[in-house]
Image (cartoon, helix red, strand yellow):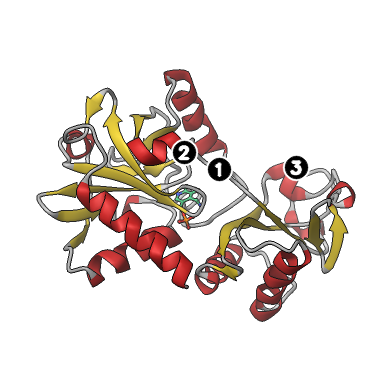
Amino acid sequence: MDLLIWIDGNLVPKQDAKISVYDHGLLYGDGVFEGIRAYSGRVFEKKAHIQRLYDSARAIRLTIPYAQEELSQALDETLAANKMRDAYIRLVVTRGTGYLGISPVNCARPTVFIIADTIQMYPEEMYRHGMAIITASTIRNHPNSLSPKIKSLNYLNNILAKWEAVDAGVPEAVMLNHLGYVCECTGDNIFIVKGGDLITPAEEAGILVGVTRQVVINLAQAADIPVRQINLTRYDLYTADECFLTGTGAEIIAVTSIDKRPIGPGKVGPLTRQLAEAFHRKVREG
Ligand code: PMP
């Protein structure tokens, strides 16, 4: 069966789910989105994702033409229509169809669509044994230019960093900020473990404030693991006991080497394992 895509209020077969070439989401990356997972028929952290979408939209002066509750129901509808229990959902709001030229004022109505599909971010093997990453020379967007807190359709910054990973033969790259501190990877947040503490860059570093990041922080705190949100340098990464990445698509994945430096003993660490197990329990139990 062909996938059914929710687009502007209608469920249509994938081959008919089309948007205009005049849509500013396509012409200028003018729009916002969410990547969301459903586990066992339930949308995971739905409220947090919807809230972030509306916050991203507000930050770019985009008025989503649906109430939060309506979009929340549309997510469930799309899952149900595709009879999916486990899915990766893409919820996108673009500025809509306008004229050529960047002005958003002629875009009459935002385009909204929801795709429920599947995703495998990294090979299974890497989830078991961890992966190698590099630091990209491409820095994260300056927060006063395009705040990384906005989950916008403009991913070129991250895509350029991803090219560096591809060129180095690794699946991900760490991006630093304009001050040289660690931000996050191209599609995931980053954590290290040092001396029993769980450490991740603070929001102020200029990161996308990940939903999975917050879930992991909560799980760690519930397990009495001290959590610190501070500035990290590459030195801190290289000398960490453990390192892992979090994201809706990635879930939790261990990093065992950065810029050719093995992290700890170069194996998936015990705290990473503990948190990954707690995470998988949580997503199943809701
Ligand atoms: N940072 C970036 C740049 C991302 O694209 C993502 C994936 N959305 C994340 C972090 C992780 O965020 P979340 O846990 O909300 O998926």
Q: Residues within 10 Å of mark 1 (few under 14, many from 20)?
A: few
> Residue at (61%, 64%) from the top-left corner?
57
Q: Nearer the viewer, mark 2 or mark 1?
A: 2
CA gap, disc 3 and disc 1: 28 Å
Give the labeled residue for mark 1: 120
Q: Extreme left residue here?
A: 195
Residue corresponding to mark 2 = 124
Question: Dot 3: within a 10 Å radius of its alpha carbon, few (fewer than 14), some, or many (20 or more) residues?
Answer: some
Q: Secondary structure at mark 1?
A: loop
Residue pointed to by mark 3: 27
Residue ID at (38%, 61%):
279
The answer to whether residue 151 is seen in the rendering is yes
Q: Residue at x 27, y 50 (%)?
A: 272
> What x and y, as percent, mark residue 180?
28, 37
From the top left corner, tell me how far across and down residue 25 is, in percent: 72, 49
Q: Earlier in the sequence, mark 3 or mark 2?
A: 3
